[in-house]
Amino acid sequence: MSAAPSPARRPWLLWVPLIGFILLATIFIIGLRKPDDPTITSKMIGRPMPAFALPAATSGVDGLTSADLATGTPHLVNIFASWCVPCAGEAPQLEILAKNKVPIVGIAIRDRPDDVAGFLARYGNPYARIGSDTTSKVQIAIGSSGVPETFVVDGKGVIRMQKIGPIMPEDLPGVQAALEAAR
Amino acid sequence: MIAEAGLVALWLGAALCALQLVLVVLALKTPFVLSEVEAREASAPPAARPSTSLRTNGEGNEAGETWRALSSAIRPVAVAQGLLTCLAFALLILLFVRVDLSVLLVAQNDHSEKPFLYRFAASWGNHEGSMLMWVSILSIAGAAVAVLERRLNERTLVATLGGQAAIGLGFYAFLLFASNPFARLTPPAMEGQGLNPLLQDPGLAFHPPTLYLGYVGLSVAFSFAIGALVTRDVGPAFARAMRPWVLGAWIFLTIGITAGSYWAYYELGWGGWWFWDPVENASLMPWLAATALLHSVTVLATRDGLRAWTVMLGVVAFSMSMVGTFLVRSGILTSVHAFAVDPRRGSFLLALLALYIGGALALFALRVGTVREGSRFDALSREGSLVLNNLLLTVILGIVLVGTLYPLILEGVTGEKLSVGPPYFNSAAGPLALILGVVMVAGPLMRWRREEVKPLLRRLAPAAALVLIALVVIKVTAPAIGILPLLGLGLSFGIMLGSIEPLIGRNLRRTPLFTWGMVIAHFGIGVALAGMACDSAFTAERLVAASVGDRVQVGPWQVTLKAVTPGFGPNWTSMDATLEAARGGAPVTLLPQARYYWAPPTETSESAILTAWNGQLYTVLGSQAEDGRWQLRLWWKPFVTLIWAGGGLVALGGALALIGRVLRERRSAKNREATA
Amino acid sequence: MKAKHQRLTLTLLAVAALIGAALLAMSALKDQAAYFYTPSDAARDHVAPGRAVRLGGMVTKGSIKKLPDGVTITFLVTDNAATVPVRFSGIVPALFKEGSGVVADGRFDASGLFVADQILAKHDERYMPPQVAGAMHKSGSLEADEKAKAR
């Protein structure tokens, strides 16, 4: 390769395509860093729980109000439903957390009392309280887009963390750490 | 064992691909320098077998021997690589047809109750399988270049095969490390998860393969451009060698887009034929770039102009294929074509994009300054019109690209969410497309070097008169018509007339085949434009709730709901409406369905379409209201079929041009051998 | 025209064309891009009637009314702060129901009614349009919850 290159007189113009591509790639990198998928994180993190009062999801449990989440101790708020398969999958992990004296409250989404009772009988009941959100209204207000999701709420009722999807065994340390941090 | 065999074949293919790249680098390193004069000669068609056209610059024969040994090894390696990937792909298809549920991909996308055709097509109806198809086509294209390409200067050909190997290597890595199609599942699944019902359609067996042949066929043009930049050999000979490959890829892209459009039309049940969905745009952008490249290659081959521009388009066309693939696979844009999304995959693909496109454009910037200036021409000439064609196509490409990426940019910058829909694309790209149509009529009527204004206007007069008459007639008969459909429909008549004008006054039997190809393709554009304009201007739509026995009028048709009955298929149950449609003559029965699939559970509406000579009656069954009436959505779409007929004509024209070019090359090669 | 000049002219033409494309695209985007609105956004920004927009929110319980023609429905979309009446003619997606999220493409008419051309819903139990769930937080507290009957 030793053909004598003739000096290009407008070298800057030849770089225009490459510069254009670099711009394009930058856009892609930005896009990849926040993928456009339906699992969106809540914009409520760092903000207080909206006020709500939910009736009990089934007989024998207490309903849930936002006041129950501002008692000075951090809570886990677990958004679940009896019709949701991954929710059954995270039940053992919730049991472990409940054994470790973590206060867990549940919000049952678009659910029937009998179904909730059946779910608790089958997979155990780690919940101190279970509110029934038949319209997904509270779910939307706290920025949850699906089931299961879990929020860490500190003693003042401020949302500190959101976990989208079921809590798996490998997620337990992270949840514990978030609870510690919320103290 | 089939899956393991497939994986071994892939690894071997990847190893051969690496070997090919090494051989090319070594071969190009052998001292071999042409003087300016010889370079000019070498870019002319070699008079005899390529190996004898080698001239060393007095370095002695040793270098020549090394060169010959290396370059003769490259072709067999390329061919073996192509065969191995095809074997791997065939094995994957076999796994799908046999529904081998110990393979993860099969368990996720296949189902034993599916008809044979869909078990077969399911092998590429998913991310991993379609990427394997991509790599297979890539290496087959490389093998085909190695076997068939006899015109190009040997050194540029070697560099081209190097480019093909470099692209292949990255996609092999992507396949083997980030999307292995042969991964096992232990324990095996009891039953597969099935295939998205929207994909359970004969269209799937046809649409992705053609589109991929087009997408990946453009990689050959990309490699040619790289090869030409490496050896600084950009000239008419290079353009003539590259042209058939570009044409071939472009034909497949045209067929793929046309078929995909018709498939979306009858499968989605929305009555539309183009939604400006990101994935549709991802297939349109390479087509626009390839169309521009097709025309600029002709300028380079015929008049030795637009050298740097053609090389850049060669890079851009395949880059658009890769960008499209990235957009679809990375999930950064939501779309109806949802592949399983995995951010790691997106990053991997983006790295490949940066490597190939960035590398090629950097090479372009460094090298193209040393490519000698092409020849000059006048603004008013066939060349001038082709430059204009290229500019317009590039601008339309830019508009589509910006519209596709704008939601992404905006969300990244301001966090605002929006969607860019048909109104933007139609209003921004539509007028330019119409101007392009005018240029398309005028261009072929001009002489190559220089054209006088008056004779040109005389030649254009009949088409222009027809357009004016059409505009007046349409406006009078349909005063409510929108401006774009009006202009489009009027212009389509002019295009249809103007595009056959190059044949007028010629001896048709002696007209070369590629001229016929051009005429038919341009005519096809006019036909498709007429179909689009008619569909948007004259479609009649009725949405009603009908009881059994009710009669609905849509356009000229009387449609009667005769019955609604439950039905079932191999993997679905349905409600079937029986409609009788008549317009004066004997009634025709249509059976639109609302289907419920159980693997995976999905509802789809199967439209029923009645095709008449002057359009289509399109019927969809909706849900049942509480009072027992059924929702029916009926469209009468006059001349909508012209859209796809036009697309078919464009592809046919391309095929004729390809055959004509190849035959002519053969003849001239024979003549040269006879005179040698 | 000398060859060198011709190349310069062509290059400049290409650059000019691309800049032109960008400007054209931008101006068309300004008019044609369908911005995403929640009912409270719409109330605050007064979207011009006739502009293509996307409306997202929740279908208010008990608000779906079927009109006698059997194919047109009206319903209310709310984000718990503001409410917009919507009219839609067509075949609604299977997952469209009261109390669940919805995204509608269409335009406002002069009276503030949103006329939807298309209602989007995905066939997915876990799905709620991200824009809805994201946008709902802006709209402050919830009203006292309704004594809604369980499904």
Image: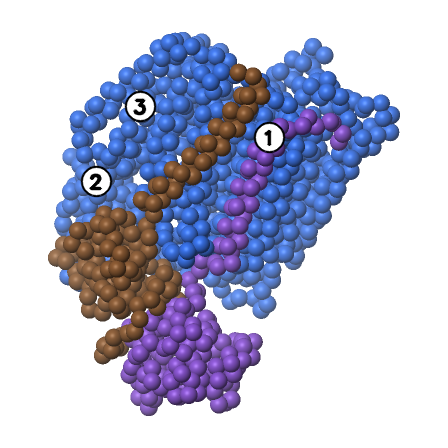
Chain colours: A purple, B blue, C brown
Q: Badges 2 and 3: C-beta atoms under 8 Å apart?
A: no
**From the viewer's perspective, is B176 left or right of B265?**
right
Judged from the image, the secondary structure of the residue bearing numbered disc 3 is helix
**From the viewer's perspective, is B278 left or right of B583?**
right
Using the image, tell me which numbered label, if any, was put on residue B540. 2
Badge 2 amino acid: Ala
x, y (%) of residue B495? 35, 23
Q: Residue at x 55, y 45 (%)?
A: A22
Chain letter for mark 3, please: B
Judged from the image, the secondary structure of the residue bearing numbered disc 2 is strand
x, y (%) of residue B21? 72, 41
Tell me if residue A77 can be seen: no
Q: Which residue is mark 3?
A: B493
Q: Badges 2 and 1: C-beta atoms under 8 Å apart?
A: no
Judged from the image, the secondary structure of the residue bearing numbered disc 1 is loop
The answer to whether tags 1 and 3 share a subunit is no
x, y (%) of residue B374? 59, 21
In the displayed structure, B353 sits above or below B626; it is: above
